[in-house]
Amino acid sequence: MLAWVVKTLHACAWADLNLVDRGFTTLSATLGKLALSLHDGLLQDAASEAHPAALTAVLRALHVLISSAPYARLPPTLLPRTLTV
């Protein structure tokens, strides 16, 4: 499952950034997009996972992300959306 998450995040990050049309993307913008994609993926997995061991792993990863994400610098709707799931 972890390999799938990493592969999905990598694909989402490159697709969202649309690097073909831009010459340069800052590290900050790249990390922000990656954090948003990671939130979305983990929230989707938490809502749809049926296997208890996999759900535990997803919730642990979500806990680490929530406790370390700089919500003051991310979109204001991200934290409420995270807490309602």
Image: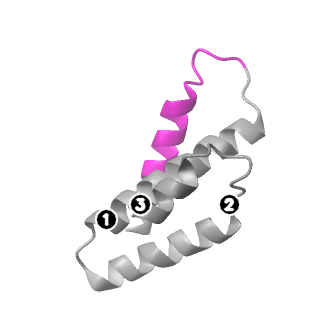
Quadrant showing the C terminus: bottom left
- Kind of residue at badge 1: Ala
Q: Magenta residues, as a range? A: 8-23
From what the image shows, is residue 23 above or below residue 40? above
Secondary structure state at the residue bearing disc 1: helix
Label drawn at residue 34: none
From what the image shows, is residue 63 above or below residue 41? below
Label drawn at residue 43: 3
What's the magenta bit mostly, secondary-structure-wise?
helix
Q: Is 29 displayed left or right of 58 in the figure?
A: right
The spot of residue 24 in percent (x, y) is 74, 23
The crowd level at tag 2 (other Cα within 10 Å; few <14, some 14-19, many 20+) is some
Q: Quadrant of residue 17?
A: top right
The spot of residue 60 in percent (x, y) is 51, 78
The crowd level at tag 1 (other Cα within 10 Å; few <14, some 14-19, many 20+) is few
Q: Are marks 3 and 1 in contact (CB under 8 Å)?
A: yes
Q: Are marks 3 and 2 in contact (CB under 8 Å)?
A: no
Quadrant showing the N terminus: bottom left
Q: Residue at x 44, y 67 (%)?
A: 2
The residue at which mark 2 appears reads as 69
Q: Residue at x 60, y 41 (%)?
A: 33
Q: Earlier in the sequence, mark 3 or mark 2?
A: 3
Secondary structure state at the residue bearing disc 3: helix
The residue at which mark 1 appears reads as 47
- Kind of residue at badge 3: Leu
Q: Residue at x 72, y 28 (%)?
A: 25
Q: Is 71 displayed left or right of 83 in the figure?
A: right
Q: Quadrant of residue 84?
A: bottom left
